């Protein structure tokens, strides 16, 4: 009697090899890492960028508070060196981006500094005035156009941006000397609002 060949005898010998390959997961971890790592990096760098924006806001608020206090008592520490109060306030910023002196560009797509405004408003109705008196309100505003996720959008030259603003308002204690404290020296091209 002739022995009949088992059907799929060749495949039966390869079956352990296929089983081993089917259960081998040696490259799975690397593949998963390659898929997840870019997302994790963008998330991490986004959190760092958000923290930096918060730092700018805190610095601008601090600068506005200092500037308002100096404006209401007619004090300009930079006048001895020929600086306006607005320029003195800007010089106190803790980052080169706020100064507008980032060379190379730094962490922003473009080189630009903060805008510093000192505006005076009448105490009676809150309207803008160019000749304030004691008791009127001095409002100091420090603004910076923050460009988000510079590391992702630098090549394209586009991306989201937010104006971060620090603002402080105080009542004038002494009559301001226009040579020391004036809204005509505002930096950054941002006009004072018509009313407080």
Image (cartoon, grey):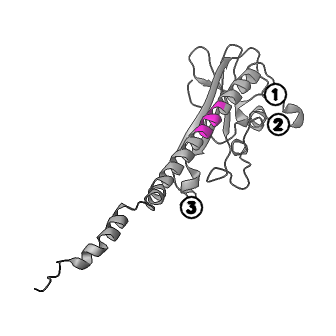
Q: Is residue 16 visible?
A: yes
Residue 51 coordinates in the image, percent (x, y) = 60, 38
The residue at 48%/55% (across/down) is 33
The residue at 48%/51% (across/down) is 39
What element does badge 1 sit on? loop
Q: Return the residue at label 1.
A: 76
Rendered-image quadrant of the N terminus: bottom left
User: Closer to the camera, 192 or 150?
Assistant: 150
Mark nearer the N terminus (1 vs 2)? 1
Tell me if label 1 and label 3 are in contact, CB under 8 Å: no
Residue 175 coordinates in the image, percent (x, y) = 76, 18
User: Does residue 144 show up magenta in the picture?
Assistant: no
Q: Is residue 6 above or below residue 190?
A: below
Q: Return the residue at label 3.
A: 155
In this image, 97 relative to 27: left or right?
right
Which quadrant of the view contains residue 72? Answer: top right
Mark nearer the N terminus (3 vs 2)? 2
Tell me if label 3 and label 2 are in contact, CB under 8 Å: no
Q: Return the residue at label 2.
A: 83
Which quadrant of the view contains residue 31? Answer: bottom left
Q: Is residue 54 above or below residue 124?
A: below
Tell me if label 1 and label 2 are in contact, CB under 8 Å: yes
Q: Residues within 10 Å of mark 1 (few under 14, many from 20)?
A: many
What element does badge 3 sit on? loop
The residue at 67%/51% (across/down) is 111
Label 1 to label 3, Cα distance in Å? 42 Å
Image disc number at residue 109: none
What element does badge 2 sit on? loop
Front disc: 3 or 2: 3
Region of the chain picked out in magenta, as a range:
51-58
Q: Residues within 10 Å of mark 2 (few under 14, many from 20)?
A: some
């Amino acid at each position: 009697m002739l022995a009949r060949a088992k059907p799929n005898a060749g495949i039966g010998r390869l079956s352990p090899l296929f089983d081993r390959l089917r259960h081998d997961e040696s490259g799975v971890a690397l593949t998963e890492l390659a898929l997840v790592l870019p997302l994790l990096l963008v998330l991490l760098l986004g959190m760092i960028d958000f923290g930096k924006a918060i730092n700018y806001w805190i610095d601008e608020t601090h600068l506005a508070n200092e500037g308002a206090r100096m404006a209401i008592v007619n004090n300009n520490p930079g006048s001895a060196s020929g600086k306006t109060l607005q320029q003195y306030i800007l010089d106190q910023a803790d980052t080169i981006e706020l100064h507008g002196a980032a060379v190379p560009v730094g962490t922003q797509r473009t080189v630009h500094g903060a805008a510093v405004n000192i505006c005076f408003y009448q105490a009676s109705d809150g309207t803008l005035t160019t000749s304030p008196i004691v008791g009127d309100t001095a409002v100091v505003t420090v603004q910076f156009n923050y460009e988000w996720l510079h590391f992702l959008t630098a090549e394209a030259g586009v991306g989201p941006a937010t104006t971060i603003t620090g603002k402080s308002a105080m009542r004038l204690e002494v009559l301001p000397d226009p040579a020391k404290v004036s809204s005509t020296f505002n930096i950054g091209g941002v006009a004072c609002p018509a009313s407080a």
